[in-house]
Amino acid sequence: MAVDTSAPRAGSAAASDGGTPNSRGRLRARLVLPLVVLLVATLLRFWNLGYPERTYFDELYYPEQARQLLEQGVETDFVVHPPVGKWLVAGGMAVFGNNSFGWRFAAAAAGSLTVLATYLLGLRLFRRRGVAALAAFLLCLDGLAFTISRIAMLDAFLGLFVTTGAWLLLVDRDAQWAGVDRSAAPDPDRSLPRRTHRWRWLAGVAFGLALATKWSALLAIGAGGVFVIASELLWRRRLTGTPWHQLTLALASVVLTLVVVPLAIYLSSYTSWFANFADTRPGRELCPEGVCAVTAPRMLAEWWGEQNEIRVFHQELEAVHAYRSDPWTWLYLERPVSYYYESCDEEKFAKGDCVTAQGNVEEILGLGNPVVWWLALPSLPLLGWWAARRRDWRAATVLLFLLLQYLPWFVVPRPNFLFYMVPAVPFLCLGLAYALWRLGRRPLLRWMPAAVVILVVAAFLFFYPIWVGIELSQPTWQLRMWVPSWI
């Protein structure tokens, strides 16, 4: 039987299982369940967040750049990413100090909120709290999402803004379909209702913040644009019988909300760069002794030159790195990134430099939860089948945001790493949760969702020590290296 591809029922945006009227108990469930999801994610991500009490992996760069933003309003050297994520790191440092907890506070908060955003996104997609909660739960206990939320890097912020942007686009879609009478026949002479698309404008802001964090947000913005255009075409066809009716207005809306707004947010994120131009790298050359008479056009030209240098850096980077990996290996977790590793050999012991006891290991490994990832892999063909043959817009939406944030990495020549998948992981979890729910509706497979939950929890507990840097004996650590390439 074909699945509805067009409009949700009016008032169903937050509908509960079965669409029954909201009693007080259901209202409490609507409020309590997302709060519980957020609380669990927050407790896990903030527990012992300050360990290790030193910078590790790319914390070598971002806390220092955040400190410069706090003290001077601008980064003084060449940087390869826009400033929003580093301003958020700086916010944590401003409140909690220039220490390991302060560096990581904002990333932990962003990772926790991403779990909540995934729940809200799943609720909009599937109209079932259980499926939305399952998707959020899978993300909450995923090792890649978990470890990236406990390190002062930018990817946790990128994941939050992308997931929020996708959720806002779904809210906009629901508002678009809210007044449509699905029992009425299409009318080619019908005037399309006027709409403000305020949720789409807010989605543009979220995607703009993502772009002002890392340029790879362009992949998510592209997915958002395809989603909106497809929604507009389906909406027009349902109302008028043709998808092309007044399509120019729809395309103009897409350009304004998902191109102009993100670019405006991106440019405005450099406000402090222009305000403190004398302290920037080009400003120190053009403003001797801090006296700056540079015109606005020249300042803008210097900024554009810096943007071009960032482009060249990412385009031509050819670094040898032990943990680089090819994108085609990401979904089955061939080569995770070891963010932090400490052991104690005889040389370190003699110098008194050991962090661990001799023969022991501490590691923080950016490894996805194998149960989540390895089960999500076979769910992708199911989603494709439901999208193509059953015309299931929910499966198509998940695949769109997942694949458009994954497949373009295949043609990127620079070194790639597994953690580039972070903004796509919520959609991986949404896809798996949806597949489990649909399969679990079959009498013989009703056990499947519960069994997967048990396995995910067991895997999280098993791998937890190598996700937070707990000291282990060498054999105990080796027991968790299921694949030789994980070492």
Image (cartoon, rainbow, N blue to C red):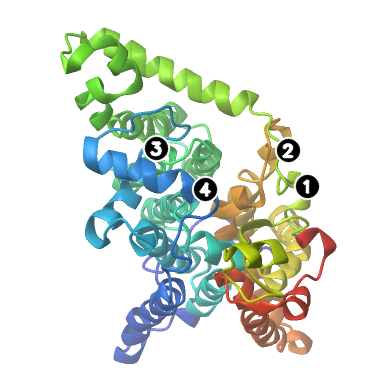
N-terminal of the pair, mark 4 or mark 1, is 4
Which residue: 42% across, 50% down?
A: 161
Circle 1: element type: helix
Find disc 3 in the rendering and name its residue.
Answer: 212
* Towards the viewer: 466 or 403: 466
Drawn side of residue 328 relative to residue 266, left or right: right
Q: Which mark is residue 58?
A: 4
Q: Residue furthest right?
A: 484
Which residue: 52% across, 32% down?
A: 244
N-terminal of the pair, mark 3 or mark 2, is 3
Q: Which three-letter amino acid code belongs to the residue tagged 4? A: Asp
Instruction: Choose mark 4 or mark 1, whichever is in front.
Output: 4
The quarter in which the C terminus is drawn is: bottom right
Which residue: 64% across, 23% down?
A: 316
Find disc 2 in the rendering and name its residue.
Answer: 410
Distance from the alpha carbon under mark 4 to that under mark 2? 23 Å
Q: Are marks 3 and 2 in contact (CB under 8 Å)?
A: no
Q: Are marks 4 and 2 in contact (CB under 8 Å)?
A: no
Q: Is residue 312 above or below residue 332?
A: above
Q: Are marks 3 and 4 in contact (CB under 8 Å)?
A: no
